[in-house]
Amino acid sequence: MSLEYNKIKIEPKKDTKESLVKRAMVLIEALPYIKAFAGKNIVVKTGGSFMEGNTTNKERVLTDVAFMQSVNMLPIVVHGGGPTLSKRLGEKAIKSEFVNGHRITSKEVLQEIHKVMNEEINPEYVRILQQLGAKAKEVHGEDIITAVKKIEIDRKTGKEIDLGFVGVPLKVDMTYIQMILNDKIIPVITPFGKGEDGQIYNINADLSAAAVAIALQARKLVYLSDTPGVLRDSNDSSTLISELYVDEIESLKHEGIIKGGMLPKVESAVETLRAGVENVHFIDGRLEHALLLELFTDHGIGTIFSIRESSTKVAKGDQD
């Protein structure tokens, strides 16, 4: 017999007694975490190169999110979609430029971003979640996030760089999101904000997810990407740092371990922790069931950040 959620079919595996026992042990290991996280808000930021254009990865990640809902957790999904957008802009011969990791967003680019995110990627995520038996709802970021235009400074000249319609979140109205969560529905949120004058801004998806997590005072914020987490050697995945505490980060910066593109992500994690979110996780979304492995096993598979001092380290999965 096979299980089928609308169009997504799950075939049963043929197991030996030994493998069945191992699977039962996995469930036993997961049980305390399932209990601890029941009723808790967990913000999941996804999208990007490992998801866009890869149906298998997309379905795996969203299967994990659907599972989280099925065990009474309250997942919130915030997604990006840069690769899909870059492809679309290329097809339309619209120039795409980046400064310090931010896409320069002209009026023409903003229109394409808005269409791709709100009309294509977001509905697809919701559709897949629904096919997996979960309840999910589209949420456009500009309907809940108040934003202001981002001021970017050139690191060499000190002059301002006009990024166009790129914004940063100023505040998040959680009234609508809380209503959705109260109905046991997964909000799937696009990374946009709206200025007080009604102007829509393109917001970095990492910043959007952090703003939502802070506004909700979420139990956890999980970033999925195509890297394993924080590595001591960026070329060696076996050097993964599984636990990091705020008091350890400065020394890792001085050692050059946290640098480059990882630096703003880590700094954002620290700000999120200091604003009241208990844990931030960086995990490799390419790994099958990465979310479940990180949340429901003793050691996890990525890097977990905590505000607590290193002298108070406890089990990885939960630090209540």
Image (cartoon, rainbow, N blue to C red):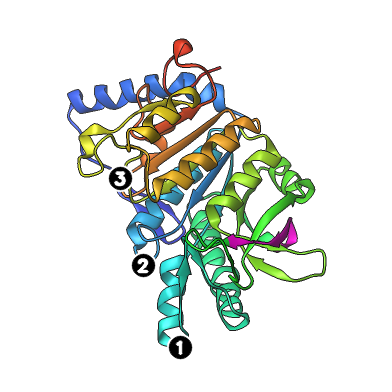
Q: Residue at x 56, y 17 (%)?
A: 320
Q: For mark 3, what is the residue?
A: 287
Q: Residue at x 77, y 51 (%)?
A: 176
Give 26 or 296, whichever is nearer the viewer: 296
Q: Residue at x 30, y 37 (%)?
A: 231
In the rendering, at what x and y percent does residue 242 appear?
35, 28
Give 103 or 161, whichever is nearer the viewer: 161
Mark 2 crowdedness (10 Å alpha carbons): few <14, some 14-19, many ≥20: few
Of the residues shown, which amino acid type is indicated by label 3?
Leu
Q: Is residue 73 visible?
A: no
From the image, state whether disc 1 or disc 3 is nearer to you.
Answer: 1
Judged from this view, the residue extending furthest toward the top is 311
Q: Is residue 267 visible?
A: yes
Query: Is 270 above or below relative to 226?
Result: above
As drawn, is 175 to the left or to the right of 307? right
As drawn, is 88 to the left or to the right of 302? right
Mark 3 crowdedness (10 Å alpha carbons): few <14, some 14-19, many ≥20: some
Q: For mark 1, what is the residue?
A: 92
Q: Please state the extent of the stretch shown in magenta in the rendering.
A: 142-152
Say which element carries label 1. Answer: loop
Mark earlier in primary sequence (1, 2): 2
> Residue 143, located in which quarter of the rendered image?
bottom right
Q: Which mark is residue 53?
A: 2
Q: CA distance from mark 1 to mark 3?
A: 33 Å
Q: Is residue 249 magenta?
A: no
Q: Residue at x 49, y 58 (%)?
A: 155
